[in-house]
Structure formats: structure tokens, C-alpha cells
Amino acid sequence: MSQREWPAALKRDKRLPVATPLREIDDLAAEARRHFDFRNLPAAEKVCKEILAREPSHVDSMNLLGLMAQESARHAKAVRYFAKAIAVDPDNAACHYNIGSSYEALDERDKAATHFREAIALGMSRAEVDNHLVMQGAAVAAALDRIKAAWPRRLGATELFAAPSIANDVLFCCGLETIRLSGLVAERLLTEARYALLRIATESAPNFGGIDPSLLGLCSALAQQCFINEYVYARSEDEARQVGALRELLQQKLHAGSRIPAFLLAIIAAYRPLHALPNAQTLTQTDWPAALAALVRQQLREPAEEARDRCTIPTLTPIADISAPVRRMYEENPYPRWTIITRDLLPKSGNAKRGIERDAKSEAPSENILVAGCGTGSKAIRTALLFPNAKVLAIDMSLSSLAYARRKAREANVRNIEFAQADIMNLGAIGRRFDKIEVIGVLHHLETPLAGWQILLSLLRPGGVMLVGLYSVSARKTINVARAFVSERGYRSTPEDIRACRQALIAHESLRRELGSIHDFFTMSDCRDMLFHVMEHQFTIPQIKAFIVEQGLSFLGFDIDPDNLAAFQRQFPDPAALVDLDCWERFETANPRAFIQTYLFYVQSPAAA
């Protein structure tokens, strides 16, 4: 997707005053866009200026004029248009991306990075960034072509980072620092880039002189990406040996009180987390260059904050013995690892959500919400943000996960959420009731899922709503094949075995094709959760229906992606079908991957008599 096409793909609000004839302005804006798309730029510019003469704050017109200035390489003029648009609509991700592109063209890299990061925070996340932006630049394409042409020979830095270089691609580096990049193409590029940077480090040790500053920035960004994915990428024995030697050099310099070269720290951080180093906290006392500031915060300061937090997390219930293996797994691998909550990812009202979501301003202040099995807190924090007047209790068995969640809640300035350690199987004794309960991706990891579900229902007030997430037998057929592959070959759930197992799966043509499209394959904790879990149950829609009927619940509908929802409504146009589980069973039979993540659905308890 090109620069001019991307903004049109983003959702953005149109700030139009009530006094303006809306249809007329909209018609003119559509005309301007058509002229632009058909490359009739003079006509597009004329219409945009006509709109702005009548409505000076029309964001789309200012954005379009900026794009036209970009096309003729008038980037200073483009910046002025985009800046005016952002002044009217500060939350417009497209305009932030566009102004970042012009700043990059003007070689104002810091300003470009600021706006790219803002665009990512505003909603250019996951698939949008991975596939349409971060991995689509000219430098990325050139690097991939070089890797392919040389394969199986591994490229050195001079070849891999020749112009156009990924080290100079500001958006690419911002993406590495900010979000998890998934996909086998991205993984191949990043493993080759890491290897080339390691060769630079080995060849320039012990003084690390003469290294291009752009390569230090790339190495720092890549190290942050590797920390985000928990070092899931494969590493050769030769790489392990070289990294080991560099770690020894770092320890020698620490012991001697010598200056530690920035590149030495960055390349080690691309293979192993800095907080796991002996005497790691002494590294925070060094005055590092700006290129390493985010890396030091991510790998040293934030883990230390989480470690201090563990002992302050309250215990709500004891942990049952039968839950110990699952708890141990999530202590070792807090799940899921996440970085930012984008504003566009806050839950939106729509199908099936009418029972649990309403305008926060009308929400009763006394409302209580339980998030059972909150993990690292991403869903719980989104819920707290969506319902700012509610009191949210988020519980989990894993202190590592809870410490991560509490840090992220402070980072997001969320004040209406309480975290506590608890076991769902013992929650019945806490003496609290809730208006809403969320239990997503948790029940199917209990030894007795339906018993856990019943305990949670006992905590739900009459007429209360529960959001439930369960694994689908149908959707997880491929994952079950991969789990059998793991079991048959005796892979253990250690980091080394998970890396080796992933490479074996990537070499398996059919499994590579299936797993390569699943986001969870590309971090250590997600991959362990998906393929190595110590306890997993899967369900069918008839099983879910039987339990709902038995408990006297009302089924309010599935929360499902728009494409599958549209397909369902084409097959079952009657609105009543949305809450008919028999219809949904027929739909899943025809579309077995429809619930590839989970069945995510709402149920409501009977109202008080």
C-alpha cells in the first residue's frame, strides 16, 4: 500500500460544524478524492481549496493537499498542511503517518519518529503496520532481495545494510521498538539483520570504534523487538558462541569499571535480556546515548519495577494444588506480552455487545466488573478504560503476569482497577458479587472448565452479563496437529526446545503455511501457550448450548470479526439468527476456521424474581 493509499484505509472522523450543509461538503470531498485517485491533481487541489474556503477546519481536505504536495516532493509545504490538520484533529493517525513521511524525506528523523510513534499509538497496529507499512518500505524490499539472492550464504553488514538501508528507515525502526512484528518474512529479515550486526560487534571488539550511528539505532530497535517476542528467533551455535564471548567482555568491563560501548550492550540485548545479566542494575547508572534510552528502560528499569511490585500484590484466595502446573507456566512466561493499547482497539458497541456495553456517562458508579484470569492485563485495562465509572477487579494466579499488568495500568494512568492473586476454583468464598464478568481464554485451561464456569456464575448478580472465551474444536484442528507434532518429537517447553520446535514446524510445508498466519506463533509465551500448554480443553457449539440451557442463561450472541459476521448474516439474514446457536453451529460447519482465536460470546443470568 502506497503513502497515498494508506490514509484512505484508516478510519478517521470528519470534524464538520452543524451549520455547514453536510451532504454538499461530503459530495465535494468525494469529488476531490476521485480526482486524486485518478491522478487529476489540479482538479483535486481546486476542489479541496473550495472546501477549505467554506470550512477552514476540514481535515480531509488539508490531508489531501498535503498528499499532493508530497507527490511533487514539496515536503515542507506538505508538513504545513498536515500540521494544520493535526491541530484540528490531534488523534488522526493518517495525518501523523503522513507528516512523519514528509519529515523523513526532509531528513528530520526525530520529528518523523515522533509522529510515526503517535500514529502507531493511535491505531496503526498489528496487521496494518506489519503488512502495509513497516514491511512494505523500499529498504525492506531491497534487504529481502539481497537475502534471497545470497541464500544460503548469510550476508555481512556491508551487503545487507547497503543503501537503501533498513537502518535509515525511520518507520521500520519505530515499528521494531513499539509493536510485535509477526510473519515469516519479517522473522527471516530480522534474524539475518541480527546476525549481520553480531558480526559487526565481533569484528569491532573490544573497542567498537567506527560503527555507523544508524546501525547502533537499528541494533537498539532490533533488541527491543527481540525482547517483545521474548527471543523466539532461532540462533546458531556460532551465534551463541559469539554472544557468550561478548557477554564475558561486558562482565570484564563491568568488573573493571571500564566504559561499556553502547553497541556492545545493544547487541547482547538482541540475544538475551539485559535484566538477566549479573549486576544488571549497575547498567542503569551509566549515561547511555539517546539511541539506547528506550532499550535501557525496557530491559532494565521496567523489569526492576515489576520485581519490586510482586511482593505488594494482594492475595485474594489460595491457589489450588490442581492449578499449580498452569500457574508455574505463567510465572515462567507471563501471557500475553503486549506493548500498547491503541485507542481504536477499545471494545466497540455492536453485535452481541448491547448487554455489556453502554455509554460510560450513564453507567452507575457502583457497578462492579470482574476480569477472571486477567494475565498481563491488556483486556482488563481496556475494560477499565471503557467503563471509567466502574470498579474493576482483575485476578490471576501468576504474580509475574500481575506485576506486568500493574505496571501497564500505571503507564496508562488507569485508576479504577484492582489487581489480586486468586484461583477461580476458590473464588466462591470471596463474598463479592459482580454486574459483569469477563473470562476469556481461561476456563479451557482449568482441569474442570464447567465447574469453574459455575463458580463464576455464582458471583454474577441477577441480570448480570458474562463475556466468555473458549477454544473451538473445529478452529483448532491445525493447532492440534501441530501439538501432536510437538508431542511425538518430545519437544519440551524450554526456550531452547521451543526455538528448535518452531524451526522444525517452519520446515514442515503444510504446518508452516497454517501456523505462519497465526499471530501467536511469533512470540515465546504465545507459542508456548498455543502448542505446549499443560492443560487445554476444547469445545463445540452444542456443548456450549447445553451448558447455557442447563444454567438457565440467555445467549446474547458472539463477538466475531466483521468478515465472518457479514458471511453469517448473508447465510442467515433473520436478526433472530444472531442469538440462535443452531444457526451458528451450521455456520461453523461450513466455516471451520471462523472462531480461530476463540468462541467469544455473551450470556446473561436470569433477572431477580
Image: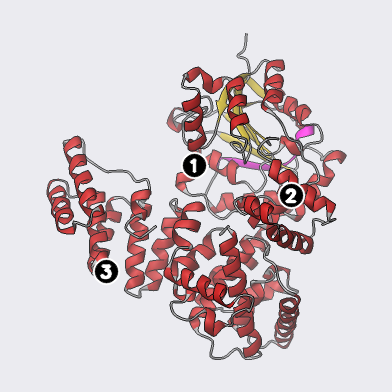
Mark with earlier residue (1, 2): 1
Label 2 belongs to which residue? Answer: 482
Q: Which residue extends farthest right?
A: 321
Was residue 594 drawn as part of the magenta stretch in this picture? no
Label 3 belongs to which residue? Answer: 75
Q: Quadrant of residue 490?
A: bottom right
Mark with earlier residue (3, 2): 3
Q: Which residue extends farthest top?
A: 609
Give how far across and how far down residue 174 sits, in percent: 48, 65
Residue plotted at (59% across, 83% down): 156
Q: Quadrant of residue 103?
A: bottom left
Label 1 belongs to which residue? Answer: 346
Residue plotted at (77% across, 40% down): 536
Please tell me how many numbered marks the rendered image carries: 3
Q: Amino acid at mark 3?
A: His
Q: Is residue 501 above or below residue 445?
A: below
Real-space Cα distance between discs 3 and 1? 34 Å
Mark with earlier residue (3, 1): 3
- How busy is the neighbourhood of tag 3: few (under 14 within 10 Å), some, or many (20 plus)? many
Give how far across and how far down residue 554 sits, in percent: 61, 18
Q: Is residue 463 visible?
A: no
Q: Is residue 225 above or below residue 531?
A: below
Q: Quick one: SS at disc 2?
A: helix
Q: Amino acid at mark 1?
A: Leu
Looking at the rendering, the stretch of residues picked out in magenta corresponds to 416-425
Q: Is residue 250 visible?
A: yes
Residue plotted at (61% across, 61% down): 228
Residue contact between numbered discs 1 and 2, judged by CB atoms under 8 Å: no
Give how far across and how far down residue 201 sits, in percent: 63, 84
Residue contact between numbered discs 3 and 2, judged by CB atoms under 8 Å: no
